Image (spheres, helix red, strand yellow):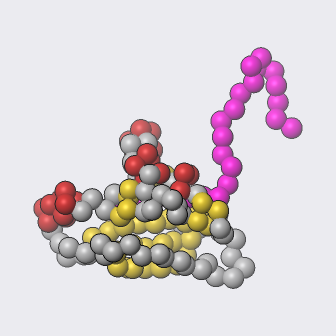
Amino acid sequence: TGLHFTLVCNGNRAIAEGVALTSTSRYFRFVCPHGLDVYSITLRCERESGESAAENAAADAVEPGMLLDSDVGVKVRGQDLLHTIRAEGDDFVRATGWLHLPARCGRLAPSVAYTVENFIEFLAYGFSGTGRVP
């Protein structure tokens, strides 16, 4: 059973499709089109099509997906964003974050889309409740 991955920029522009993965480490570098503002990169690792669900489950037990080198990370415009990677999926995945922690260590499950984004996002509140953000 073979693994391959696809990269999509900003949710709709394919940068790489069906790139094969092997057991040997390989450095991948993909260049987004010149002048394109990059807001997010989505990475999806999948098994070769045509395999049954049982074959995929057996393969997942032996080869659980894609392993990223956490020392290299996932760089967008030279900035490592691996620590921001999050799994896309149903409400359970989003609510519990059960796939986020392994992904942030570089372990990506097959058939799950992972997204890294280069923006700032946070939740804040004031101690008194009367503060405001200018």
Left or right: 92 in relation to 15: left
Where residue 64 appears, as percent x and y from the top left, is 27, 59
Where residue 51 appears, as percent x and y from the top left, is 18, 72
Q: Nearer the viewer, residue 78 or 96?
A: 78
Looking at the image, can residue 88 be seen? no
Q: Nearer the viewer, residue 110 or 76?
A: 76
Q: Quick one: which residue is furthest to the right in this view?
A: 134
Q: Quadrant of the C terminus?
A: top right
Residue plotted at (38% across, 56% down): 107
Q: Is residue 124 magenta?
A: yes
Query: What stretch of residues is rendered in magenta?
Result: 110-134
Residue plotted at (69% across, 71% down): 37
The prevailing secondary structure element of the residues shown in magenta is: loop
Q: Is residue 85 magenta?
A: no
Give the image quarter of residue 21.
bottom left
Give the image quarter of residue 26.
bottom left
Give the image quarter of residue 111.
bottom left
